[in-house]
Amino acid sequence: MPHIPWWRLPTLLAVPKLINFRNDLRAKNLHDTEDEPLNVGIPPIEDVPLLRMTRTIDGTYNDLKFPKMGACQARFGRNFELKECFPDKEKLLVPNPRTVSRELMTRDEFKPVPFLNLIAASWIQFQVHDWFAHGRDESVPNWFELDLAGDDPWPSRPMRIPPTPGDPTYNPATGKPPTFRNINTHWWDGSQIYGADQATFERLRTGVDGKLKIQDDMRLPVNPETGIDDSGFIDNWWIGMSLLHSLFTLEHNSICDGLRKQNPGWSDEAIYVKARLVNAALMAKIHTVEWTPAILPNPTTKLALEVNWHGIAKDLQNVFRFLDDSEVLGGIVGSHQEHDAAPYSLTEEFASVYRMHPLIPDEFVFRRCKDDSIFGTHELPEVSGIANRPLFEKYALDDLWYSFGRMHPGQIRLHNYPRHLQHLIRDNGQHFDMAAIDILRDRERGVPRYNRFRELLRMPRVETFEQLTDNPEWAQQIKKVYDGKIDDVDLQVGLQAEPLPDGFGFSETAFRIFILMASRRLRSDRFFTDDYTPEMYTKFGIDWVEENSMKTVIARHFPQLAQFLPKSGSAFIPWTQAK
């Protein structure tokens, strides 16, 4: 009998398979990298009782027994046994990452995702900036140097790329692979809006009624030191970030208004901490039950993601009761905090599968929401970095949101990498090829190459280049770049080449990491489990999270756009065209 992939099974048969995949991954694909216990050198919660009631600035005290778990500067964990995570130093530059970029990733023509809009592409960067960042230290020595082909137009030779900042506490004598630290918190706590250090927290607040600073024109203030919107995390800034950061700053302030009305005697601090808690949970819910089903529009994945948040609907509970899984019946949110096989952290492999740069177009077409007429066309550099703010102020916000609702992102496939990101010139004048860097970072950080990555997830390896992809031309191109060595194919190349399951915007291999880590970010966080209660959030706060969506958030702050939002489906699918 031929094997039937899970995504082609009826939903009631496919969901149990996904749950079994997830449980197997929880048992075998969570590995700790920390050397020091996560409760050393930090006061117990009994000494600072207020920490029990709020998310901290730096992510400490989410786990009350191990207060440093998931905090700023905690190490990235791994999804594979540590012996599998050493960088292959002999092949670190083989094949040349610049060659991989030019030959396999360069966008020949823009290939759109017809079932998504550009808000979806902006959203994932917005979320990634909450989850992880390795930081930069361009003063370090020993930059990587890539030889360039004679016809390569790169302006200097060799191409030089700074290494990932190292972990100063890493000790090679332990026999473990190199470790790296997350400069953000590992928790889903809205740090991209609020910051993750005391100075940023204080700078962004008004000090009145719990609110964040935002201008009367609904745009964030400009930080005079950077020339960029002032927010919690501003790396790799572009107009999509301006829209989302300002929107969820406005949403924070609306939550503050509601809390003030319900609790007129509360202080600025009391309102602020609860509004932050509610806003972060709303963003997590939007990502779980709206963004992810939009990029993976498959009935099985949609139901599985609803299960993560809400549990199985009552009319289906008897169908799935045989799984004996209370999480399935009731949802992760509101259940008990659980870390499974390792202390909670985000992982290097999770960061790798979220390298989704092909989503970004090179050209942006802006339209008026009154009649759909085009009023501006701009290339990516014109809407990025310090160049972004003048344009962001020039155009009406409702027209910008409408334009993003009408534009499409790019497919996460080979030959669809933004050309401007292959020739990225930062505000400081430095010149980088982000596609080459994507390849190099996986190798540098010991992320296994594609075939080994699949094997470690207990997925079948590919034996030939023709099996790797259903595009015969791509198969020959990949074979040439990798000199016929299938096991040398980089993770990013494999992810962007492999055939996609029905209704998927990214690969099944990436999805295996996703089904593990997406539920883990909720299950390990006490503010989504034991402390997702009216006592912690207030009843008003819980109701705000459960009753709102990306559509209601947009419509609250831009009511004139409600008519264009999809009648069915999320705000991340193409909007209705103005007449």
Image (spheres, rainbow, N blue to C red):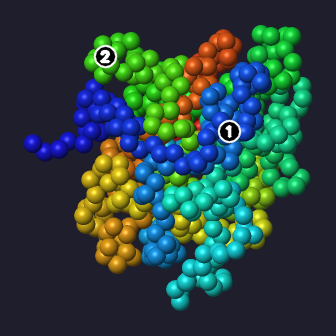
Q: In the displayed image of the protein, which residue is found farthest to the left?
A: 1
* Residue at x 68%, y 59% (from the top left corner): 168
Under mark 1, the amino acid is Val
Location of residue 424 by image quarter: bottom right
Camera-side mark, 2 or 1: 1
* Residue at x 46%, y 21% (from the top left corner): 331
Q: Where is residue 98 drawn, in percent x and y?
A: 52, 75
Q: Determine the CA span between mark 2 and mark 1.
A: 41 Å
57, above or below 225, in the image: above
Location of residue 30 by image quarter: top left
Tell me: 43 left or right of 287.
right
Residue in front for this viewpoint, 515 or 236: 515
- What residue sits right under mark 1 in the picture? 40
Q: Is residue 26 visible?
A: yes
Q: In the displayed image of the protein, which residue is found farthest to the front?
A: 173
* Residue at x 46%, y 27% (from the top left corner): 308
Q: Is residue 291 visible?
A: no
Quadrant where the image shows the N terminus: top left
Under mark 2, the amino acid is Arg
557, above or below 579, in the image: above
54, above or below 357, in the image: above
- What residue sits right under mark 2 in the picture? 321
Residue in front for this viewpoint, 66 or 387: 66
Tags 2 and 1 in contact by the CB under 8 Å rule? no
Q: Where is residue 39 drawn, in percent x and y?
A: 65, 36
Tell me: 333 left or right of 59.
left
Does label 2 or label 1 sit earlier along the sequence?
A: 1
Residue in front for this viewpoint, 250 or 453: 453
How would you rate the neighbour count of disc 2 (Cα within 10 Å): few for under 14, some for 14-19, many for 20 or more? few
Mark 1: secondary structure? loop
